[in-house]
Every structure is written in C-alpha cells, then in structure tokens.
Amino acid sequence: QVQLQESGPGLVKPSQTLTLTCTVSGGSIITNGYYWSWIRQPPGKGLEWIGYIAYSGRTYYNPSLQSRTSIFRDTSKNQFTLHLSSVTPEDTAVYYCARGRPVTATMTLKEEYDYWGQGTQVTVFS
C-alpha cells in the first residue's frame, strides 16, 4: 500500500516562497513508470495541476505557474518537494501530492492518479 503525506507550513506571507514536502512510503519514487505530482484546489474551485517529477527525475510544470515553480526530490528520503515562489493570496488552496502513470503528456487527468495524500491547507495572508 503506497502512502503519501504532505508537510509544510499552513500559513505563508505574500511574496514568500512556499515549500511543501511529500513523503512517500510503501513504494519508491524512482520506480520505473511512476510520476509524482503536486496538485491544488483553491476554495470553491476545481483541481489545478502544478507539475510533476518523473521516476527519471524529469520535471514538467503547468505553464501558468512555471515561472514560480520548482519540484525536486531526495531519493535517499523517498521525498519530493514543491517550491512555489512569490506567493499571493490567489495561491491559497489545499495542496495535494499524488502518484500516477501518464496517459496524457501533462498528466492533468484525475484518472491518471492512483494514490493521493490527504492534502494540506495553505493560506497566504499578511
């Protein structure tokens, strides 16, 4: 059974960098074929895909967030981390990490994912 757990601050001030870490257990983040994503859901809105890091280490970011996004991994800890810079109140959302296998190039279909973290609320306010 694969489990994912998000961790990070619940409150972030505008212009700061949000850092969230996803710790994976029950499976390796370098297992061939699996992609590891960050996804968020702002209040009252649908899911928004932020980006992923593949088993190979290749990354892909949502073009609308690409200039502010970085995803990297620590294979020794079986973790992957999201950095989102220059946050604004519009970045307030529940942030999820998830595992999937690609059907689309951008992995923006919910059906591509089989395991999700429980989600963590991030609020940006001054």
Image (tube, rainbow, N blue to C red):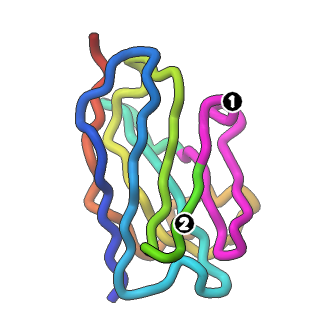
Q: Is residue 34 above or below residue 27?
A: above
The disc labelled 1 sits on which kind of residue?
Ser
Q: Depth check: 39 or 19 in front?
A: 19
72 left or right, relative to 126: right
The disc labelled 2 sits on which kind of residue?
Trp
Image coordinates of residue 9 in percent, x first then y, are 27, 39
Locate the C terminus and report the quarter of the image it occupies.
top left
How many discs mark residues in the rendered view?
A: 2
Q: How far apart are marks 1 and 2 (CA)?
A: 19 Å
Q: Residue 41, which numbered label?
A: none
Q: Earlier in the sequence, mark 1 or mark 2?
A: 2
Reading the image, the residue beneath label 2 is: 36
Reading the image, the residue beneath label 1 is: 67
Image coordinates of residue 84 in percent, x first then y, are 51, 35
In percent of the image, x 32 and y 77: which residue is there? 3
The secondary structure type at the circle numbered 2 is strand
Callout 2: 10 Å neighbours few (<14), some, many (20+)?
A: many
Give the residues drawn in magenta, as a range. 49-70
In percent of the image, x 55 and y 47: which residue is there? 49
Q: In this view, does 43 lie above or below 104?
A: above
The secondary structure type at the circle numbered 1 is helix
119 left or right, relative to 37: left
Q: Depth check: 18 or 93 in front?
A: 18
In percent of the image, x 37 and y 46: which residue is there? 95
